[in-house]
């Protein structure tokens, strides 16, 4: 199947949305936890978390500030500066998916979706107890992407929780051991099976390719 | 294991790099193909491709313009405005990985890594023949991320090639059927096994969670 730009524009809206949302490849499945100034906890699934730098340790994610669902997340981060990123495991993809429903602002997605908020002393935002890999962040900067009204939200890592058995001595994290899941598009979930690690690639140390 | 911001800063550099590069979760494994004005084809692996919008169909990726390896990719895109994004399959992760070696500018990574450039009539940049899902893009905008000197490169989709058997009628792309691979950190590759699709989530149509 070969679609040109024109074919894509002429596709039925939902089909176009599904294709273009899938086409970048596998995406990380993360729950973002936040809290408003009254202490109402919020959790929502995001597939746009991206590594931006290691020193300082920066992660980004893309949000639509005027969107209905992630709006609570955006407003809470603006109000409190703190949020958490929690890996969805292959055991609770369904619960995680349903956090995307447009619940009223005073409804806790944790409760509705059978997930458990968990707090670290001195850190406002809720972690997700069911996750194995959990990250607490401080908001640093929002970069507007004017082309389509979204915002790249950048935060610095304050806390990082990783299970011992998933963390190798050299710092590699085995996502299969951590049961971390992936997302394609808006609705499809994947389990991850590790193929291999390869060494740092040097031009004069190429293997034989066949 | 619980690391605070201070613990992370005090980690040995390579270990910190490995952890922080893994911690966002699974990343898509894509080869970006580009060409300079003399026709020299370049291909390099990127794990930062991200969906930005469906109408227009926009994809982004993060590059360090002053970095040594992706520099060819950046310079070529600035020179020609065209590039391709090609899914790495679980069958050629090793070849794809070695495109990250710092080859000299006049060396073709395609040739060195056993990959085959493929062209569409009227589109300058090379696709990767061994990929099953291939995207041709026109560069639209580079957004500098001043916090760490990287750039979010945004392009609009001009061509989209997807195998029939991986594309459902509703536009869902089955990444297991397409053999699409994922990356964790800089060196670890994963095969994707589809768990399930879930419907669009509505607050009044929640399933029973147990």
Image (cartoon, coloured by chain):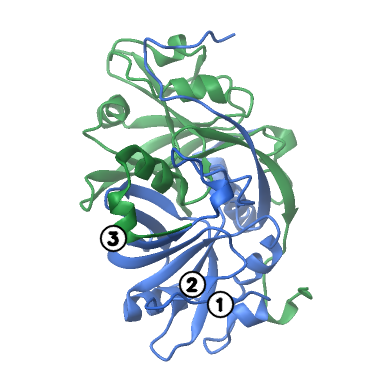
Chain colours: A green, B blue
Mark 2 touching mark 1, by CB under 8 A? Answer: yes
Q: Which residue is mark 2?
A: B33
Give the answer, above or below, for where A20 lies relative to B149: above
Task: Indicate the position of residue A14 as horizontal and vertical percent values.
Answer: 34, 37
Between residue B207 and residue B121, name the one nearer to us: B121
Rendered image: mark on residue B117: 1
Mark 3 touching mark 1, by CB under 8 A? Answer: no
Q: Secondary structure at mark 1?
A: strand
Tell me which corner region of the image, top left, top right, bottom left or bottom right, holds residue A130.
Answer: top right
Q: Which residue is mark 3?
A: B143
Give the answer, above or below, for where A155 lies relative to B67: above
Instruction: Tell me which label, 3 or 1, sits earlier in the chain.
Output: 1
Instruction: Tell me which label, 2 or 1, sits earlier in the chain.
Output: 2
Residue at mark 2: chain: B
Q: Residues within 10 Å of mark 1 (few under 14, many from 20)?
A: some
Q: CA distance from mark 2 to mark 3?
A: 20 Å
Query: Which quadrant of the figure contains the C terminus of chain A?
Result: bottom right
Q: Secondary structure at mark 2?
A: strand
Between residue B45 and residue B63, name the one nearer to us: B45
Residue at mark 1: chain: B
Q: Residue at x 37, y 75 (%)?
A: B77
Q: Residue at x 45, y 9 (%)?
A: A111
Same chain assignment for discs 2 and 1: yes
Task: Indicate the position of residue A87 as horizontal and vertical percent values.
Answer: 55, 32
Task: Indicate the position of residue B203 as horizontal and vertical percent values.
Answer: 37, 13
Q: Nearer the viewer, mark 2 or mark 1?
A: 1
């Amino acid at each position: 199947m070969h679609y040109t730009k024109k074919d894509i524009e002429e596709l039925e809206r939902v089909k176009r949305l599904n294709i273009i949302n899938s086409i970048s490849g596998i995406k990380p499945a993360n729950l973002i936890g936040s809290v408003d100034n009254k202490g109402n906890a919020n959790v929502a699934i995001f597939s746009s978390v991206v590594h931006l730098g290691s020193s300082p340790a920066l992660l980004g994610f893309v949000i639509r500030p005027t969107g209905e669902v992630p709006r609570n997340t955006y407003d809470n981060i603006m109000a409190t500066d703190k949020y958490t990123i929690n890996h969805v495991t292959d055991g609770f993809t369904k619960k995680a998916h349903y956090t995307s429903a447009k619940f009223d602002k005073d409804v806790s997605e944790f409760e509705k979706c059978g997930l458990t908020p968990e707090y670290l002393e001195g850190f406002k935002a809720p972690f997700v107890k069911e996750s194995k890999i959990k990250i607490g962040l401080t908001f640093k900067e929002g970069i507007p992407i004017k082309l389509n009204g979204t915002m790249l939200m950048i935060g610095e890592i304050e806390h990082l929780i990783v299970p011992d058995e998933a963390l190798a001595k050299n710092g590699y994290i085995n996502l299969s051991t951590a049961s971390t899941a992936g997302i394609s598009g808006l609705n499809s979930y994947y389990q991850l099976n590790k193929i291999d690690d390869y060494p740092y690639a040097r031009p004069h140390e190429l293997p034989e390719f066949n």
